[in-house]
Image (cartoon, rainbow, N blue to C red):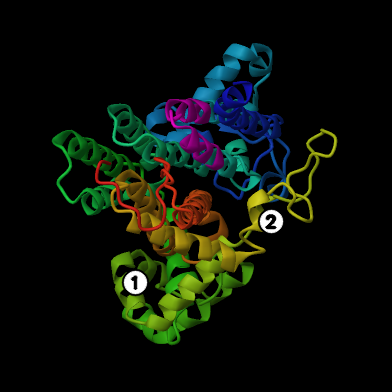
Amino acid sequence: MAIVAWRRQAPAWIALTLLFVTVVRLGMGLGYANNGDFWRAMAPSGIVYRAGLSDRQIFFRDRQAFYQLGPSPLHPGEVMYSLEDLVVWAAMILQKALAPAATARGVFHLFPVSAILAALGYVLVRAAWPASEARRWLAVGLVWVAADPYYSLFLGSMYSEGLAIVALLGLALALLVMGGSVRAGILVGVCLFLFTFSKTQSVLTPVLLACVWLAVLRRRPSLRVVGVLVVVFAATAAFFSTRPPQTKLRAVGDFHTVFYGVAMTSAEPASVLADLGFSPEAVELVGRPMFAAETRLYLYPGFEAELASFSRWRALLVHLREPTAVRDVLRRASAALRTTRIDYLGQYEEPYGLPGAGVCGPFDFCAPRSVLSDRAWPLYWAVLALASGVVLSAGAWRWLRMYWLFLALFATTHVYIVFLASGLFEFEKHLVLARLALDFLFVTGCAVVTRSATVLIFSRLSLSRGGITERPADLPPLGARNPAR
């Protein structure tokens, strides 16, 4: 009885330990270094960088745990660009309550941001915690993936990926372990809301989920479900479309989409640039990031007007007509998804002040998934391919198929959403959510393949001995169908 009780409680304790370790790793408020994007989350709360720091100390490899409190904007809601900005604003209120002396000195520490995101992650995991023992272990697998430093260190930053990772974890759990209950529907709606409002690139997520719903259930979803998806999509689109325009930021994205993306992957960049409305002189900019010092030497009169008239829809059509360019993007995406560390963001060996603790050592000892991804990449895809066959052939297990197809569709479309947003610039960082979705699928795929193979083997042995083996209810074997589900 004690062993049975431990088996039931062990998944919860393991998940709680993983979440606790994540909080400890972020305890000093040291996450990813800033590459110049923190200002969007800092502006609504009036947070500024400490006085006397150089650009080198603020950006890239130097992590900043301490900031200063400056004057708050008159209308903070107008300069909020995602819910991550609201998390930072809430963290400032939390610090005022817990550390009034530090706040009075004008000091802001990053740890309250990490604490709020970690607490939100705990709430979502607890809300989605399944009753089935087998699915509890699957839930632990997803928490294990999200607690990996490659992802959890984003929680120690002001990047919008932090909130997106937490929301995608909750959404995956809701789709995987809770079936079609009303509670699951509410949790899916909450996580979908948090996820779509976390990043502009996630606006189409409700549409993807609706497409998967129709494909899996083969019937129209209820009006309640349609209403939730429509409201989330419309609210997100309205929110991001009404933000004050960031002309400089948009110009940077457009530049990289053209010259560090569409034209860079084409075999005939001059022809592509002509189709996009650029002058012949623009060919000298192909393959150059906008922030490189030498890039300014190749700018010419009228370039800004040409860039302002650039259309991403036109760029997509021009890009898709060249199959070799499409293959090049997918090849580069595959290489980016294998990356276990994002070095330029400061994820290198750096002590936390704890014995033996670091961000990532030379052998990536703190990134357990790297063994099965970067160092065994063919095996990674083999598991995903085999598990896809199992999931799709087990036609009656519709909620697992919905989980699988949604994450697969999200990961594949996210590659091109990122490519059209900023080309191949910082491709590894921008694909972190696609990588998270694939890692969720990989862990679930390992469980599906292992259980299905085990059941199949024991069924064959039982049949050869003239016995009958009962199939477990949680995970079907290869090709199994269960009309009751």
Viewer-proximal residue, 347 or 365?
A: 365
- Callout 2: SS: helix
> Which amino acid type is marked by label 2?
Asp
Asked where in the image residue 316 lies, by quadrant, the reply is bottom left
> Where is residue 485 drawn, in percent x and y?
28, 41
In the picture of the structure, the residue carrying the numbered disc 1 is 315
Q: Which residue is mark 2?
A: 343
Range of residues picked out in magenta = 120-141
Task: Determine whether, in the image, residue 478 is placed left or right of residue 264.
Answer: left
Number of residues whose C-alpha sits closer than 10 Å to that of mark 1, classed few (under 14), some (14–19) or many (20 or more): many
Quadrant where the N terminus is found in the figure: top right
Q: Amino acid at mark 1?
A: Ala
Callout 2 crowding tier (Cα within 10 Å): few <14, some 14–19, many ≥20? few
Residue 276: x %, y % from top left: 33, 76
Q: In this rendering, is residue 397 above or below 46?
A: below
268 to 424, vertically: above or below: below
Viewer-nearest of discs 2 and 1: 2
Q: Secondary structure at mark 1?
A: helix
